[in-house]
Amino acid sequence: MTSRWPAPPLPLLPDRGLPVRLYDTATGFTVPTAPDRVARMYVCGITPYDATHLGHATTYIAFDLLNRAWRDGGHDVRYVQNVTDVDDPLLERAAATGRDWRELAGEQTDLFADDMVALAVLPPDSYVGAVDAIPLVVEATQRLLAAGHAYPLPGHERPEGGTEPDGDIYFSVHADPRFGSISGLDEASMIEVFAERGGDPERPGKKHPLDCLLWRVARPGEPSWDGGTLGHGRPGWHIECTAIALHHLGMTFDVQGGGSDLVFPHHEMGAAEGHLLAGSWPYARAYAHVGMVGLDGHKMSKSRGNLVLVSQLRRDGAEPAAIRLAILSHHYRSDWEWTPFALDRANLRLATWRAALAAGDSGPADEHLLLALRERLADDLDAPGAVKAVDRWAASQLAAPPSVPQDDRRHPVGAERLAGLAIRALLGVEV
Ligand code: 5CA
Ligand code: ZN
């Protein structure tokens, strides 16, 4: 297992948070989550070839809100995240920059951890690299083959020249009668999106254009591992997450999360593989997706290179709490554009909140704020609503400073007031 980043302090709050409702992409409804005491969540992790940008940060902060709200509601949270530490884009970047792919992945995974620590994101309980998960992927692929849900492709000439070797293993997506139920896309759209997002609908010899790669047999110059009966090779992308999720969480976990760019094909394929491997349904109870953060009119992406890196903002002197607050002012499901003004606004807001905390003392207003934060977050993680609730609380504190003199407050000097604890525990903002 890849080593996790250290956990930030998590203040305990009085009483209990509310059950969290979340918008489920698969059904299109906002649904109750986590019926059991143990709440299980899988969030798709980074492909570590470039540092954390604000889009990644937004995705992990969204699920961090869920993690915090679940814990506040009395759940034991089991949180699993992967690191796609071997895949085409990583190998291509390493080759293009003349670097060792392992070194690049290790360095970027470390940078990501530093950013997560700075942004006060609670670490996953299991943080699993694709390379470490190869035995799980091999076993899952062998089982799909044995059940007739996967097939090897014969070698062939590539349309663009050169040859492909014998033996890549493909998953028959239509073996799962529920294939399509996560994204709800029609087949033509699926084929289009599949081609845009790492799929190979045109590859000759496949039984169906949407069938996806489970195991890529070794090619000269590419890393490969012993796959037993599959031969030497490396994992395909979707099966990586399915194998890790089934092993570390088990079937029918509570939330499968990631950015909305993963709805199709990644989460559709992952669910189909899961259904067939487990012989049951559903793979996850809810599929939650974070809107895309853009810059200059386009989705922020490593491949396009229009990035604002968290590490760069930090080097430029941005306070991590302000970065987090800037992100929290947008609802997790909306697409939005980063602008430098977002940080200015967050700095002002943070200063106001801190002034309000210094101006007053724990009392009914703080208790109301705690209730409001719990209520807003339970409603599909309405962080902007929660932020506005803190704004209103701050305004009331600053408008009517307490009559009790500073030295006679109810709390001993240094004890933190309830409003500060609630903001830190539920929003993860260091006030
Ligand atoms: N390793 C795969 C998932 S298994 C992957 O998509 N890696 S990634 O590095 O490209 O993205 C990491 C996470 O950030 C994914 O959950 C992805 O959906 C999310 N993400 C990527 N770009 C953005 C963006 N512009 N806005 C919001 N979230 C994003
Ligand atoms: Zn994934």
Image (tube, rainbow, N blue to C red):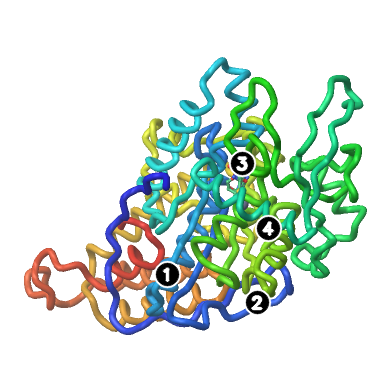
Up/down of 200 relative to 136, above or below: above
Q: Say which element carries label 1.
A: strand
Q: Which residue is mark 2?
A: 30
Amino acid type indicated by mark 4: Arg
Q: Are marks 4 and 3 in contact (CB under 8 Å)?
A: no
Q: Say which element carries label 3.
A: loop
Up/down of 314 relative to 3, above or below: above
Foreground of the two, 297 or 354: 297
Up/down of 154 relative to 161, above or below: below
Q: CA distance from mark 4 to mark 2?
A: 35 Å
Q: CA distance from mark 2 to mark 1?
A: 20 Å
> Assess mark 2: CB under 8 A from ligand 1?
no
Mark 3 or 2, which is nearer the eye?
Answer: 3
Q: Which residue is mark 4?
A: 143
Residue extending furthest toward the front: 229
Q: CA distance from mark 3 to mark 1?
A: 33 Å
Q: Does residue 295 appear to the left or right of 419 in the view shown?
A: right
Disc sitting over residue 347 in the figure: none
Foreground of the two, 211 or 191: 211
Q: CA distance from mark 4 to mark 3?
A: 13 Å
The mark that comes first in sequence, 3 or 2, is 2
Q: Which residue is mark 1?
A: 77
Q: CA distance from mark 4 to mark 1?
A: 29 Å
Q: Residues within 10 Å of mark 2 (few under 14, many from 20)?
A: some
Q: Position of residue 227 (x, y in %)?
A: 61, 41
The mark that comes first in sequence, 3 or 1, is 1
Q: Which residue is mark 3?
A: 227
The image quarter in which residue 37 lies: bottom left
Amino acid type indicated by mark 1: Val
Mark 3 or 1, which is nearer the eye?
Answer: 3
Q: Are marks 4 and 1 in contact (CB under 8 Å)?
A: no
